[in-house]
Image (cartoon, helix red, strand yellow):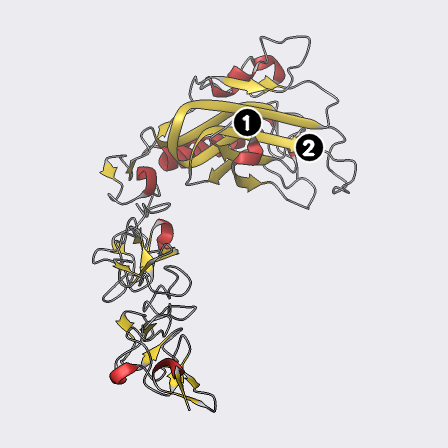
């Protein structure tokens, strides 16, 4: 069954009316942020660089979608890559993107679907698509199915919308794909809120206060990331105990008491446990210090000078001569001397204490003994003080 010219025109008007209604309904709540914004394309068809320039895709005109309609941007021919982008002037909150490809005003599928088959749409904060977010990849595998009118949901934030296509020599494409690619864009509409910290149909609802960079979903208001210290869809929940920072992924240091720290910056509010110091209690005590927040000094009588366990102050190399206990802060008991007080005094005069460091008897030896430590018995034939008596 064939349609006559009048029936065909009537059907086309009906389809166009329906399409405009749907697009208008979907777009009416948001502003077309791409309209008359600066645009760029990798190449322009050489014979008419002004007529088919990149700006034609954001001039608001696409009632005549033919090459001669002066309403479409058309790239140079015989290219293996095609790229077009629009600069939205600042980072904005995007809802969706409408693509209107060249049709020569014929019924879809038109004569050029094979040229745009496989295209990509990115949103980026730079002019490089690799830095951005892939919103859409046209991957129809059946001939004549790619559509020239495409509404792409892409609720993200960004400054540049990039249309890109390619034909790589190392890739086998469906048979209906063209050998070369073009960007024959009659219009690209980017709908959203011009100020990124607002969302909703009228762009009048502020994003939750703890959204990172005040960025939230344009439709739901859910944060696209939280400021340090908060989590949840609307970033209303503080980090759980012993966690803090961006996405609550950092662990508190060795905080005292319950181990909790400030949920934003990780500062320990009540000081540090034994052996740690610093605002976040993540730094070990410096040499010579120990205990809570490293506030105590190691004993000066540690055998290895000021070298003690950072948690309990125990001297790691034992005690100097004349001192004892784990922390080396107590002198030897009477009758003991030397390293860790592990030696006994000799036979000092009148049973007096010896020097607790070197063991020497301060008032000499008891009769019958001699030597620096009074630990030598008089040899046969000698007796008395310092063994000076002779038999």
In this rendered view, identify the residue nearer to me: 100 or 340.
Answer: 340
User: Quick check: 85 above or below 316?
Assistant: above
Which residue is the extreme one toward the left? Answer: 270
User: Quick check: 5 above or below 118?
Assistant: above
* Residue neighbourhood size for the residue with mark 2, other residues' Cα within 10 Å, grouped as few (<14), some (14–19), many (≥20): many
Q: What numbered label is drawn on residue 9?
A: 1
In this rendered view, identify the residue nearer to me: 152 or 266.
Answer: 266
Spatial separation of the CA atoms under disc 2 and disc 1: 35 Å
Residue 244, percent across and down?
Answer: 32, 54
Which residue is found at the position 38% from the left and 75% from the top? 340
- Left or right of 126 in this view: 341: left
In this rendered view, identify the residue nearer to me: 370 or 53.
Answer: 370
Residue 384, percent across and down?
Answer: 35, 86
Instruction: Tell me the quarter of the picture where residue 227 sits.
Output: top left
User: Quick check: 161 above or below 118?
Assistant: above
Q: What numbered label is drawn on residue 166?
A: 2
- Left or right of 227 in this view: 156: right
Instruction: Tell me the quarter of the picture where residue 184 sits.
Output: top right
Q: Is residue 257 visible?
A: yes
Which residue is found at the position 23% from the left and 66% from the top? 257
Q: Secondary structure at mark 1?
A: helix
Q: Secondary structure at mark 2?
A: strand
């Amino acid at each position: 069954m064939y349609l006559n010219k009048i029936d065909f025109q009537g059907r086309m008007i009906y389809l166009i009316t329906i399409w405009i209604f749907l697009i208008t309904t979907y777009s009416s709540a948001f502003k077309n942020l791409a309209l008359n914004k600066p645009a760029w394309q990798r190449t322009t068809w050489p014979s008419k660089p002004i007529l088919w320039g990149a700006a034609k895709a954001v001039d608001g005109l696409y009632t005549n979608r033919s090459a001669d309609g002066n309403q479409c941007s058309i790239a140079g021919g015989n290219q293996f890559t095609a790229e077009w982008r629009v600069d939205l002037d600042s980072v904005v909150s995007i809802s969706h993107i409408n693509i209107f490809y060249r049709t020569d005003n014929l019924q879809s599928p038109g004569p050029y679907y094979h040229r745009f088959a496989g295209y990509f749409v990115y949103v980026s904060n730079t002019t490089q698509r690799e830095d951005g977010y892939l919103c859409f990849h046209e991957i129809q595998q059946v001939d004549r199915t790619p559509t020239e009118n495409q509404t792409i949901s892409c609720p993200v934030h960004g400054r540049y919308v990039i249309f890109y296509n390619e034909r790589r020599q190392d890739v086998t494409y469906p048979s209906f794909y063209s050998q070369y690619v073009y960007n024959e864009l009659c219009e690209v509409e980017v709908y959203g809120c011009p100020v990124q910290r607002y969302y909703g149909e009228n762009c009048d609802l502020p994003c939750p206060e703890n959204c990172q960079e005040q960025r939230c979903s344009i439709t739901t208001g859910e944060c696209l990331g939280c400021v340090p210290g908060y989590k949840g869809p609307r970033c209303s929940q503080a980090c759980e105990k012993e966690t803090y920072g961006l996405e609550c992924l950092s662990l508190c240091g060795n905080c005292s008491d319950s181990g909790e720290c400030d949920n934003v910056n990780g500062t320990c509010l009540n000081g540090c446990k034994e052996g740690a110091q610093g605002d976040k209690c993540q730094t070990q005590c410096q040499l010579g210090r120990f205990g809570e927040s490293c506030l105590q000094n190691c004993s000066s009588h540690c055998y290895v000078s000021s070298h003690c366990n950072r948690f309990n102050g125990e001297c790691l190399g034992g005690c100097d001569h004349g001192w004892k206990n784990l922390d080396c802060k107590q002198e030897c008991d009477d009758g003991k001397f030397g390293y860790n007080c592990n030696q006994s005094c000799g036979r000092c005069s009148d049973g007096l204490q010896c020097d607790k460091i070197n063991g020497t008897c301060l008032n000499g030896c008891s009769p019958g003994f001699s030597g620096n430590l009074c630990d030598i018995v008089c040899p046969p034939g000698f007796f008395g003080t310092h063994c000076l008596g002779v038999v």
